[in-house]
Amino acid sequence: MKQLIQAARGMRDLLSPETDYFLSLQDLLLKWSNSYGFSYIRLPLVENEKVFTSSLGQNSDIIEKEMFYLKGKERGEKLVLRPELTAGIMRAYLQNGLHSLPQPIKLFQIGPAFRKERPQAGRFREHYQWDLEIIGSAEPINDAQIIQIIDSLFKKLKLKDYIFKINSIGCPDCREHYKKKLKSYYQSLNRKLCLDCKRRLKTNSLRLLDCKNPICQPFKAKAPESLNYLCKFCQEHFKKVLEYLEEMEINYELDHTLVRGFDYYSRTIFEVFFQEQNFAIGGGGRYDYLSKALSAKEIGAVGAGIGIERLTSVLKMHQVKLSFFKKPNIFIVQISEEAKKAAIKIFELLRKNNIAVAENFAKSNLSDQLSLANKLGVKYALIIGHEELGNENVILRDMKTGAQENIYWSELIEKLKDKL
């Protein structure tokens, strides 16, 4: 027997009603982003490897072991499936000359990213993100606004028990001093560290705070705090960010162990957590030096990404109902070959008049069709048989009470609209 071909590991099919929920959430995020003045941008799924190797950091987990490479090369370039969205947006900003437009530029996208990591609950190798970016400004108000946009969405959806964890890792100058202190602290613990952290100690000490291995978790509590090593400019920047958050009444807490997994981050960084989850559903921060990794320009920028799958999980946990497609109110039942010809015309008439309607023209049995109408939860069934064809009417059955009445075709739309 031929073996059934399965979806690739870590990938999944999304079927109804999950697709309905996804499209509704996507529609909400599209309108929400636009209401804050963000323009939609769509980027290719395939990028030059250098977009990420130049910006994420050679010692990041993504660069070392999580990127999907395409076989072969294109004009000598290695191509990859994008593992994240921000670096691609900055590449597009630079390539398309968006720096010549009035600044800052506000861009957003909703799309997939691909990472070759171990699949687990809430994490897939193909995952969708809602991505927001403000490029062309170094002002702290933009850091706070990115957080506010996410916070106000959660409040609109009546979500509770979430908090923004926030930190500042400073600019490259003050961060180097901090990294030396961090390295010195962890060197005294070298024998107790996991294998990955032993390597991080030699390559990038900041990544030590990003370790998820339970062995290394206790060491974070007594690690040096980056806020104690900020230069005057970075101190002032972060102070203003916190003042804006307090003015906006956003629930946050300082977390000195918070770093982000990519080298392009600087100054403000944050993640958002829900009480029911033991992982962040999203995060972001400032990346004023990402542009220098891709070009000669230094451009202030800040952004955030929210995982769609993780957000969906939280929404369902909070019993937030979303629906993109109209649920049918009417089911057309036909019980003869001639009745099908009339039914298909009536179906189109209802559809053109924006009445959500369902059918199963492949069936002719009355009870089969009424059973499906019940499963769909429609309010009414329109029944067309031999007698109704001769009288040019239909039987309208109330699916809840079973009450029936005859309606002439010429009055059908008006009567249905009154009832619905």
Image (cartoon, grey):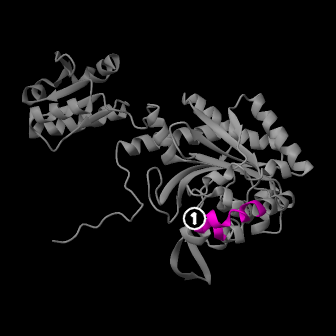
Please tell me which residue is depicted at 38% across the width and 31% down the height of the picture. Answer: 354
Front residue of 9/139: it is 9
In the rendered image, residue 88, in percent from the top left (x then y), is placed at: 65, 62
Report the quarter where the N terminus lies: bottom left
User: Which residue type does callout 1 highlight?
Assistant: Arg
Magenta: main secondary structure equals helix
Q: Which picture quadrant has residue 6?
A: bottom left
Which residue does the image show at 57% across and 64% down from the upper left? 82
Is residue 36 in sight in this rendering? no
In the image, which residues are magenta?
Answer: 184-199
Q: Split into 4 quadrants, where in the image is the C terminus? A: top left
235 sits left or right of 373 in the view: right
- Quadrant hosting residue 12: bottom left
Query: Residue at the right extreme?
Result: 232
| Left or right of 20 on screen, residue 278 | right
Query: Dot 1, crowdedness within 10 Å: few (<14), some or many (≥20)?
Result: many
Say whether residue 85 is magenta: no
User: For the image shown, how many numbered marks are present on the structure?
Assistant: 1
Percent position (x, y) of residue 353? 36, 30
Tell me, yes or no, if residue 385 can be seen here: yes
Examine the rendered structure and indicate whether residue 132 appears above or below residue 24: below
Where residue 355 sits in the image (x, y, percent)? 34, 29
Secondary element type, mark 1: loop
Residue 333 image point, x, y percent: 17, 32
Question: Is 372 drawn above or below residue 170 in the view shown?
Answer: above
Q: Residue at x 53, y 74 (%)?
A: 69
Q: Residue at x 61, y 37 (%)?
A: 32
> Magenta span has 198?
yes
Q: Please name the residue that numbered disc 1 is placed on.
A: 82
